[in-house]
Image (spheres, helix red, strand yellow):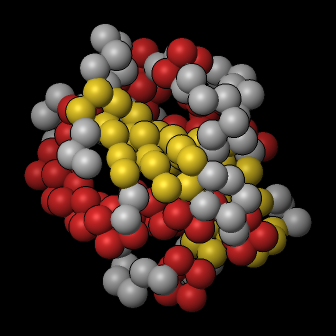
């Protein structure tokens, strides 16, 4: 059954992981999620890779874009769905949200912004971004399992533009954050 995302309000505290679509996702491992009680929000199809890890964490998949309707919805776990997309009729279980009413986002924007606001609604005040390679490595290549399904095209300018918008939302919400680079354990933080 699909439930309102407000059922998850203040369910968690502390840190939330948000998983992006960078090429470094190919190297992600359970060690990259040392806080086993922190929720994990996967953007679109990244849930397929994260599910392979069998994390003990509560894992959610944010499905905001109507073009990312999955072939196998069972693989998408606890889906978080934007009500204005076509996805709500595909999923049997999960949570739905309205950007303006539930997340207080007044402009239509990318998935990373919604994920930040979902983490805030969860009660988390620190975010660790994983596999956001446009920020950590300066490129926009996708992981291998994406390349099998989607054309790899250069979106670096768009991703960096979204990052600047995301920084403003993080600041407005008073959240601390880190962009974690998979592989050598380096992390960069702006706040």
Q: Is residue 33 above or below residue 43?
A: above
Furthest residue in direction top, as rendered: 184
Position of residue 51 measured from the top left corner of the image (x, y, whole percent) = 66, 29
In the image, 178 versus 165, the foreground residue is 178
In the image, 92 versus 176, the foreground residue is 176
Position of residue 99 measured from the top left corner of the image (x, y, whole percent) = 51, 79
Q: Is residue 142 visible?
A: no
Total numbered circles: 0
In the image, 67 versus 121, the foreground residue is 121
Furthest residue in direction right, as rendered: 1
Report the side of 177 relative to 2 (left or right): left
Position of residue 176 measured from the top left corner of the image (x, y, whole percent) = 37, 51
Report the side of 51 relative to 145 (left or right): right
Query: In percent of the image, x 25 and y 60: which residue is there?
Result: 167
Q: Is residue 51 above or below residue 64?
A: above
Position of residue 146 measured from the top left corner of the image (x, y, whole percent) = 42, 33
Query: In percent of the image, x 20 and y 40: which residue is there?
Result: 135
């Amino acid at each position: 059954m699909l439930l309102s995302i407000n059922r998850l309000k203040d369910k968690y505290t502390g840190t939330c992981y948000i998983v992006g679509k960078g090429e470094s996702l190919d190297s992600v491992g359970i060690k990259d999620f040392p806080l086993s009680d922190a929720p994990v929000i996967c953007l679109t199809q990244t849930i397929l890779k994260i599910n392979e890890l069998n994390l003990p964490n509560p894992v959610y998949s944010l499905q905001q874009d109507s073009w990312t309707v999955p072939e196998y919805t069972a693989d998408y776990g606890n889906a978080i769905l934007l009500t204005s997309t076509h996805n709500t009729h595909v999923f049997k279980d999960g949570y739905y949200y309205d950007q303006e009413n539930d997340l207080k986002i007044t402009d239509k924007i990318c998935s990373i912004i919604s994920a930040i606001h979902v983490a805030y609604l969860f009660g988390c005040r620190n975010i660790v971004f994983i596999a956001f390679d446009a920020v950590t490595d300066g490129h926009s290549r996708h992981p291998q399992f994406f390349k099998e399904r989607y054309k790899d095209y250069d979106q670096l300018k768009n991703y960096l533009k979204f990052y600047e918008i995301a920084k403003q939302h993080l600041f407005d919400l008073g959240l601390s954050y880190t962009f974690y680079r998979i592989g050598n354990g380096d992390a960069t933080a702006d706040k």
